[in-house]
């Protein structure tokens, strides 16, 4: 290769400014042969052309045989490690250097089978004129180049001498091959916890994202290609040992090695080790395929004893822990998705005659295969045939989309049910609004003006439970069979305790004493005081004060008077005349967002209560609110335009849960507060600290046009204050701003694709501390800048120089999918323990 060819091979490849090679070097000074272990050799005169970046993996040997002055005996595969950076050879200090660094060099210079060990650098002379280019190198074993390993900043000072140069011997052989797989802990050779070899070390695979496609790659590698693989999680066959090599594995199914699949470093424990059940070998006398299900000895195909296939044989399931969710998985797997499955125990369909394969089955109802449910390791049980489990997969015919009301006081109210796959299903109250109740009334041909939803569970539950819960319904006027809906299965956000009901207005001309849901204060002539009475099914009655709260008091006052009026409870004995009325409601616990008392959580209407009229609710509505419903303020931020969201409902300040919280919702908050000069940043996880008071809203879904957060869709919460939602609003219109909140830029790099990361907050640019800074964080920055075509790399220790402004972010912890760096987890903006020497940077190649 000529001089010009060498020169081209050394030129940097944009956009990465630092190119590297590595070699094992011994000195070749021309002397007489010696009896020392390594004959001294002289390296030819070094020039800027000695480094090549075109070698495999960027590595090369520095003493090609043709440059020797005479034949000498040189110990093969040993020497001082030298690396080329920017066309200059140099050495590596051994601070933090370990076996993973050794093996990376050996496998790159020779082949994947070779491993090595560190040796004394004093055995290799001739380095006095070389710089020490790297220090504190801590390879993790997954890198493709030494410069990808965590290390001291390249241009930083070090505390090393050439006595600490890394020298290695690549003379070992790996105990296993990279990508080699074994299964451990199973009863059969074709099942177990996955063990995979990396750098001569056996380790495990974390079960995050682990699915049948990934499991299929494992089984194909092991030669089990005769059927579908079963992916198992949660150390199903016991916890493995050694390092956890892979996490977030995503295979396409065509890979010939698990290492060819996409994966990432782990954040797991061995209790998350992935496992697999592979299909029986091709030559096995198999009667069925792993995971197959059948029902035996029932009266029809929809019922029977549950039998499952393992390793070509049928076996039964023990009924310990067996319930309707487990039955639902069986029925769904068999394609019987139109009914409410019921679990049968105690060998209800007779005793099986084969093995008992499964015990303590615990499905969440969403699994596609019974073997993917939690439970004992297959074959591990303490049962007999008298405990064989079974199922009913019944079907109850009806016309899909038809609505009906069940268990109400009259035909105009009751628990709302809809026909799904020819089976009656209940409706989840989460997210169900009065507008949807009106649509349902219209869909059933009933009046809808003034319709409202009931409290969840108010009309009880159906006699036979099933997996379907409708979470959204839309019905065209007077077309009850043309409703659209979406469904979900437990144990998601809903159970039958969340079944919602509907109160439709009675038809015109129906004689009424009062309208269901009407309220009044009675028993006195004093203004705005009295015993609270409610009308249900054309009858007035009282309310027991068990669980009655301030939200409920304020609801009555605002309903009867106006939004500015609040009240307090008073002694019911001051108000007479309720002795002959029934007690119609008990355990009423309003949340402050309802439109009718019957929408508040409470004891089922037809349930018995333990109250007397001495416990009737009585109130006085003579107070004035301290805040208005929907009023918003921000708390905990360094600027008035940022913070944890506080919202007022029923005169009480509370917070918003971050479930489903996004930029559109945050924009409504900022618009309400008058910050309309740019995009809002939605923050989660109590980013500005936990709020106080009740959590008023959850699962907020705004369109962006709302004038109040209360105009958005939302539901009652299942959150803690550690999930409080926050926002960073754009600077006011008249602010002297240089940038927009959340903007990022790269500074002091050699080109536009690299540099120190700077982020905009409140019109000013600041830097990011490198604590916890990694490639996932770098990916968010590069994606935000539109550089989505490469593999981003994180840079630490002010690799692109120190910034001169404020440090805004610290302990940034992105998952890689965030659209904006400010939406990653981390310290509250401005809260850090860093200096400019820790400024973070990125390469977006």
Image (tube, rainbow, N blue to C red):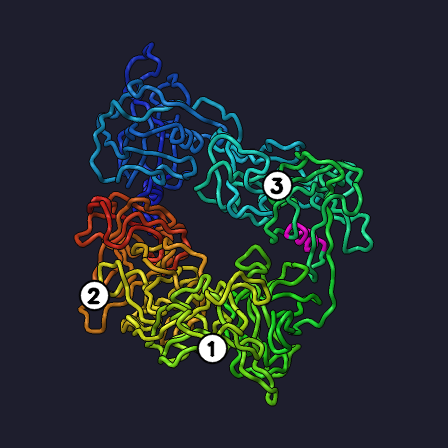
State the CA–CA distance, disc 3 to disc 1: 52 Å
State the CA–CA distance, disc 2 to disc 1: 56 Å
Q: Which residue is mark 2?
A: 738
- Looking at the image, residue 703 sits to the left or right of residue 362; the answer is left
Q: Determine if the magenta segment contains residue 327.
A: yes
Marked residue nearer the N-terminal end (3 or 1): 3
Above or below residue 263? Residue 553 is below
Label 2 near label 3: C-beta < 8 Å?
Answer: no
- Looking at the image, residue 199 sits to the left or right of residue 86; the answer is right
State the CA–CA distance, disc 3 to disc 2: 58 Å
Front residue of 68 and 729: 729
Residue 375: numbered disc? 3
- Looking at the image, residue 259 sits to the left or right of residue 652; the answer is right
x, y percentage for residue 631? 31, 71
Local crowd at mark 1 within 10 Å, few (<14), some, or many (≥20)?
Answer: many
User: What is the magenta range?
Assistant: 325-334
Labels 2, 1: front one: 1
Front residue of 537 and 709: 537
Question: In the orientation shown, which residue stands out farthest toward the top?
Answer: 35
Above or below residue 82? Residue 350 is below
**What's the residue at 27%, 32% (across, down)?**
46
Above or below residue 133? Residue 483 is below
x, y percentage for residue 70? 35, 19
Local crowd at mark 2 within 10 Å, few (<14), some, or many (≥20)?
Answer: few
Residue 519: numbered disc? 1
Marked residue nearer the N-terminal end (2 or 1): 1
Above or below residue 587? Residue 309 is above
**What's the residue at 42%, 69% (across, down)?**
572
Res 500 quadrant in image:
bottom right
Labels 3, 1: front one: 1
């Amino acid at each position: 290769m000529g001089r010009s060819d060498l020169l081209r091979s050394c030129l940097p490849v944009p956009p990465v400014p630092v190119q590297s090679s590595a070699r094992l070097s011994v000195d070749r000074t021309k002397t007489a042969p010696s009896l020392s272990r390594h004959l001294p050799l002289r390296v030819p005169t070094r020039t800027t052309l000695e480094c090549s970046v075109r070698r495999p993996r960027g590595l090369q040997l520095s003493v090609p045989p043709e440059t020797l002055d005479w034949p000498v005996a040189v110990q093969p595969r040993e020497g001082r490690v030298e690396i080329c950076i920017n066309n200059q050879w140099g050495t590596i200090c051994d601070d933090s250097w370990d076996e993973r660094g050794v093996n990376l060099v050996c496998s790159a210079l020779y082949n994947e089978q070779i491993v090595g060990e560190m040796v004394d650098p004093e055995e290799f002379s001739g380095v006095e004129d070389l710089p020490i280019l790297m220090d504190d190198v801590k390879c993790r074993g997954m890198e493709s180049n030494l410069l990808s390993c965590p290390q001291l900043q390249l241009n930083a000072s070090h505390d090393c001498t050439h006595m600490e140069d890394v020298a290695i011997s690549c003379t070992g052989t790996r105990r296993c091959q990279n990508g080699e797989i074994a299964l451990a802990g199973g009863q059969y050779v074709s099942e177990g916890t996955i063990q995979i070899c990396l750098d001569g070390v056996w380790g495990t695979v974390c079960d995050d994202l682990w699915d049948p496609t990934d499991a299929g790659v494992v089984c194909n590698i092991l030669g089990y290609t005769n059927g579908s693989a079963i992916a198992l999680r949660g150390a199903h066959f016991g916890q493995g040992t050694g390092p956890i090599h892979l996490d977030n594995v995503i295979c396409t199914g065509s890979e010939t090695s698990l290492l060819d699949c996409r994966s990432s470093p782990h954040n797991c424990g061995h209790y998350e080790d992935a496992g697999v059940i592979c299909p029986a070998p091709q030559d096995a006398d198999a009667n069925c395929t792993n995971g197959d299900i059948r029902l035996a000895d029932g009266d029809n195909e929809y019922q029977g004893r549950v039998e499952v296939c393992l390793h070509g044989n049928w076996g039964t399931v023990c009924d310990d822990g067996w319930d309707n969710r487990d039955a639902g998985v069986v029925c769904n797997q068999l394609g019987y998705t139109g009914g409410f499955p019921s679990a049968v125990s105690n060998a209800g369909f007779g005793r099986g005659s084969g093995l008992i394969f499964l015990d303590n089955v615990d499905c969440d109802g969403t699994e596609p295969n019974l073997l993917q449910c939690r439970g004992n390791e297959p074959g591990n049980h303490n049962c007999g045939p008298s405990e064989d489990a079974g199922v009913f997969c019944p079907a109850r015919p009806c016309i899909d989309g038809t609505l009906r009301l069940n268990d109400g006081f009259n035909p105009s109210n009751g628990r709302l049910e809809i026909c799904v796959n020819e089976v009656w299903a209940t409706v989840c109250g989460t997210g169900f609004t009065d507008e949807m109740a009106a649509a349902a009334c219209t869909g059933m041909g009933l009046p809808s003006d003034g319709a409202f939803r009931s409290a969840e569970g108010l009309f009880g539950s159906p006699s036979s439970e099933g997996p379907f819960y409708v979470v959204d319904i839309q019905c065209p006027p007077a077309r009850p069979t043309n409703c659209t809906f979406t469904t979900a299965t437990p144990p998601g956000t809903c159970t039958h305790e969340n079944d919602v009901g509907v109160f439709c207005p009675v038809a015109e001309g129906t004689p009424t004493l009062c309208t269901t849901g009407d309220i009044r204060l009675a028993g006195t002539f004093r203004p705005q005081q009295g015993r609270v009475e409610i009308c249900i099914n054309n009858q007035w009655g009282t309310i027991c004060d068990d669980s009655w709260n301030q939200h409920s008091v304020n609801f009555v006052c605002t309903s009867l008077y106006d939004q500015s009026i609040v009240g307090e409870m008073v002694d019911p004995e001051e108000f007479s005349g309720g002795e002959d009325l029934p007690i119609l409601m008990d355990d009423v616990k309003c949340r402050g967002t309802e439109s009718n008392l019957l929408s508040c959580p409470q004891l089922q209407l037809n349930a018995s209560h333990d109250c007397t009229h001495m416990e009737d609710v009585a109130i006085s509505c003579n107070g004035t609110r301290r805040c208005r419903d929907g009023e918003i303020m921000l708390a905990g931020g360094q600027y008035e335009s940022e913070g944890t969201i506080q919202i007022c409902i029923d005169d009480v300040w509370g917070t918003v849960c971050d479930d489903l919280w996004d930029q559109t919702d945050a924009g409504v908050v900022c618009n309400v507060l008058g910050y309309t000069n740019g995009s809002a940043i939605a923050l989660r996880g109590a980013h500005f600290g936990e709020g106080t008071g009740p959590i008023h809203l959850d699962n907020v879904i705004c369109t962006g046009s709302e004038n109040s957060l209360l105009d958005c869709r939302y539901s009652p919460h299942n959150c803690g204050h550690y999930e409080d939602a926050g926002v960073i609003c754009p600077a006011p219109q008249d602010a002297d701003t240089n940038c927009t909140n959340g903007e990022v830029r790269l500074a002091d790099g050699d080109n536009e694709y690299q540099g120190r990361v700077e982020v905009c907050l409140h019109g000013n640019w600041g830097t990011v501390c490198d604590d916890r800074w990694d490639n996932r964080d770098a990916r968010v920055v590069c994606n935000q800048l539109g550089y989505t075509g490469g593999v981003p790399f994180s840079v630490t220790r002010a690799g692109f120089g120190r910034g001169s402004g404020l440090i805004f972010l610290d302990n940034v912890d992105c998952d890689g999918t965030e659209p904006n760096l400010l939406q990653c987890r981390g310290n509250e903006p401005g809260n850090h323990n860093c200096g400019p020497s820790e400024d973070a940077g990125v390469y977006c190649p």
